[in-house]
Amino acid sequence: MRILAVVVVLLVTGCAGLTPRLVDASVQKPSNVAVYFTVDTRDGEPVPGLTAEQFHIYEDGKLVSPYESKQTILNPEIAAKHYTLLLVDMSGSVSKSGQLPALQEAVNAFTSKVGQYQETAVYAFDGRPDIFPLRNFAPGASTVNVSGFATQDPSTNLNGAAIKAMELLDKHLDKSPVPLRFGTLVVFTDGTDHASRATKEQLMGWVNAVPFDIFVIGVGAEINEAELSALGRSGAALSRDPGQVGAQFDKIATRIEGYSKRFYLLSYCSPARAGDHVLTVEPFLPDGRTGETTYRFNANGFGPNCDPNRKPSFDIKKPRTSAQRP
C-alpha cells in the first residue's frame, strides 16, 4: 500500500546553477522511494545525461550512502509518457509553392529525432474547419507523406486548426495508460490566419488555458512574427527565407529532444524505518554546479528487502495538459 506524502516542497539554491523541479514521488513498502523530476540550468536549459552517481541523496540533512540505498536511475517510460503533435500548414501558399520536397524532408527528420523519445503524430490543415491525420500517435520514426495531402481549401485556418489540435492532444492524453502524461504541440505555418474561423482572442484563450508546451515554426515572407511568437509560448523558430524550413524544424526538434532528456526517475531504498522525513535530491555537475529539490515522506512500517528496480506506484493523474477550457 502506498504511503501518501504529507507535503511536497520545492527548493532551489539561489546561486547553485541548477534548478531541479519535482514532478511526482512514489513511496512503497518495504522501503522504496522514487522521485520523478527535471533538471535544468538556472538559465532554463535542459540538463540531460546525468547518471545515478551524479546525485546525492539526503534524508533529514544526512547523506545516504549510495551503497546502502542502492540508488539507481530507472527508465522514465515505465511511469511517464510524452506526446508531440506536429500540425502542418498545407494551405495553397504551401502546397503550390514548390517547397513540398523540402517540407517533406523536414517533417520526416523532425519525427525521426523526436520519435526516439516521444510518441509523435502529424496532422495537416488548410482552410477547412478540421485537421487531418497524416500520422497517428506512435513511437519511433516513420515516413509521413506530406506531399500526398490534397489541399481542398487554399485558405489558411491557422487559429481554428491550432485550437482543434490542442483539443485533440488534450483528449489523447486523457486516454494514456501511464500515471504521468505530458504533451507538446508544434505548429508549422508560412503565414497568418485568413479563414477567420476562430478569432485571435479565442486562440489565445486556449493557449493560456492549456499548460502543455506550444512551439511554432514559421517560415515564409508572410509570417507575422509577433502573432506567431504569442502562439508559440514555449518557443518559436521563425525565418522569412523559405530555404530555412529544414533548419527551423531542426531547431525545435533539438529543443524538444533536450526537454525529453531532462526528466529523471531516481529510485532508492530508504534507511528510515519510522516517522516523517525530508528527502533532498541534489544533482551535481563536474564544474561544480548543483541544486536541490525536496520531498517529505512517512516511513512508518519500512523494513529490509527493498529492490530499487521495482516499478514505482505513482497515482494516476489528470494529464498535465488538461485545464479549464475557455
Image (cartoon, rainbow, N blue to C red):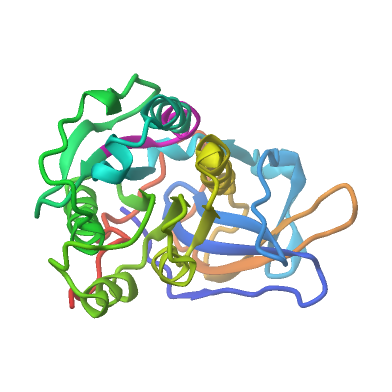
Q: Is 203 displayed left or right of 29 in the figure?
A: left
Quarter occupied by residue 321:
bottom left
Q: Position of residue 101 (x, y in %)?
A: 40, 24
Residue at far top of view: 143
Q: Nearer the viewer, residue 259 or 49?
A: 259
In the rendered view, would you say 322 is above or below 190? below
Q: Nearer the viewer, residue 63 or 102?
A: 102
Q: Position of residue 110 (x, y in %)?
A: 46, 33
State the residue at coordinates (44%, 25%). 105
Q: Is residue 121 magenta?
A: yes
Question: Which quarter of the rendered picture does the C terminus lie within?
Answer: bottom left
Range covered by the magenta-colored residues: 111-122
State the residue at coordinates (31%, 53%). 1
State the residue at coordinates (24%, 64%). 159
State the residue at coordinates (41%, 32%). 99
In the rendered view, would you say 260 is above or below 61? above
Q: Is residue 177 in view?
A: no
